[in-house]
Amino acid sequence: MLRVLRNGTYTKLFAAQVIALLGTGLLTVALGLLAFDIAGDAAGSVLGTALTIKMIAYVGVAPLIAAVVDRLPKKAVLIGADLVRLAIALLLPFVTEAWQIYALVFVLQSASATFTPAFQSLIPAILPDPDEYTRALSLSRLAYDLEALLSPAIAAVLLTLISYHNLFVGTAIGFTGSALLVLVSRLPARPDDGPAMTFWQRLPAGAKVFVRTPTLRFLMLTNIVVAAGTAIVLVNSVVYARGVFQRGDAALALALACFGIGSLVVALAIPWLVGRLGVIRTMVTGASVIVAGLVAAVVVTVTAAFTGAGWIPLLVTWSVLGMGTSLVNTPSSRLLADASTPADRNLVYTAQFALSHACFLITYPIAGWVGALNLTAAAVALAILAICGGVGAVIYARVRLRGSIAEAPSLRPVRRHPRTGAADT
């Protein structure tokens, strides 16, 4: 997996991602505690609203910005987005009202909606070999998981020494480091894609690829499952930790860390799993694991309502949800790279960014607003949604994707020699 770091450009971009993620992890903990200070037991509702606004920015703003900046140099786009995120991070410690959280989150996430697809669409051009790209995806997932593990742990240590408001400074440092590393990177030149498309042609281009590509329609079904499993963790962890189980600030960090541990364990094995199962089967397995985790979350929530016990089972459940999320998300970019060309890759990645986060416009309000009224009802609703998406993904994979996978060797399992382990060609 680590051999992809021999590529100097990828190494700098990966380091930029890691530093920015560390700052974002501190932001996640600090924002949850800020919401609890402002709204108390209704913190889940505040976070649910903030995260819904985040999804609105991702869904509504990402395609528009991608169409606007698609012809601009990638380096300028990435650095500009980082500078906007830096400015917002420096303002967040001064927030005193929920509406201020909502406004700043919208601007911050609009910048992230610009940065993330542009960043992700660069990697296939830097690492065109499918096996190396899979290793890069696993390394990227590993970075996300280590952030989920280490950022809460670092935040827990820092919270014993400083106010959580100071965690926002760490976020600002992360975005600064990311911008500097992008600045010193040599990014690939934009491909010569013939006559330039107009803004109105670029705007729907990525979505059109999704509509006509069977594997990307399958990806949309798995997006629903991931959104359900992720929403209960990100929105309701603070409610479970502080409200249901009456634990301190560090308990939120621990719950989020368990989600990261589960994902981390699986991310290390993704290249091996994809090589033996293929991309589609790996993702189907992940969707099934998420469904099982949400069913377990319902059981834990009901048990806690009657007995007040269940903190350890909750942490185990969060780990299972992390495992399933990694099994789906890590190899999913292989589908995007296979379905796109260098000319439309940024637009296709942006379409996935927007469409996948559109699912959160459903799951975040369920987790936050329904959860504020009845936590059990929210868990049940999310489990039912995940079951529907998971069953749909399994049926679609079996009925519609066999021919598509046969025509795309990069998505098939790698057949290896039983003695040498070398890939058969």
Image: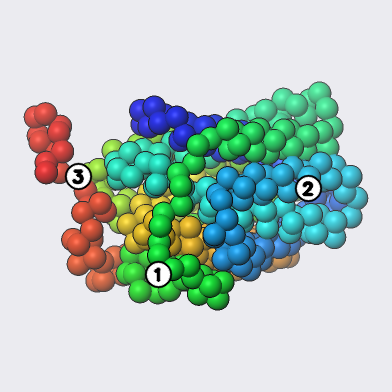
27 and 370: which is toward the camera:
27
At label 1, the amino acid type is Val
Q: Is residue 122 above or below residue 54?
A: above
Rendering coords of residue 288 (x, y %):
38, 56
Q: Nearer the viewer, mark 2 or mark 3?
A: 2
> Disc 1 designates what residue?
209
Q: Nearer the viewer, mark 1 or mark 3?
A: 1
Quarter the C terminus occupies? top left
> Disc 2 designates what residue?
88
At label 3, the amino acid type is Val
Query: Which quadrant would residue 397 be assigned to in this image?
Result: bottom left
Q: Are there few (<14), some (14-19), or many (20+) residues within 10 Å of tag 2?
A: many
Image point (78%, 34%), residue name = 169
Checking the image for residue 122, the label placed there is none
Rendering coords of residue 380 (x, y %):
56, 64
Q: CA distance from mark 1 to mark 3?
A: 26 Å
Can residue 32 be seen in this snapshot? no
Q: CA distance from mark 2 to mark 3?
A: 45 Å
> Reading the chain from its start, which is encountered first: label 2 or label 3?
2
At label 2, the amino acid type is Ile
> Reading the chain from its start, which is encountered first: label 1 or label 3?
1
Q: How many marks?
A: 3
Rendering coords of residue 206 (x, y %):
46, 67
Q: Is residue 353 left or right of residue 5?
A: right
Q: Is residue 114 left or right of residue 204?
A: right
Q: CA distance from mark 2 to mark 1?
A: 34 Å
Q: Are there few (<14), some (14-19), or many (20+) residues within 10 Å of tag 1?
A: some
83 and 59: which is toward the camera:
83
Q: Are there few (<14), some (14-19), or many (20+) residues within 10 Å of tag 3?
A: many
Can residue 27 be seen in this snapshot? yes
> Disc 3 designates what residue?
414
Q: Is residue 171 left or right of residue 325?
A: right
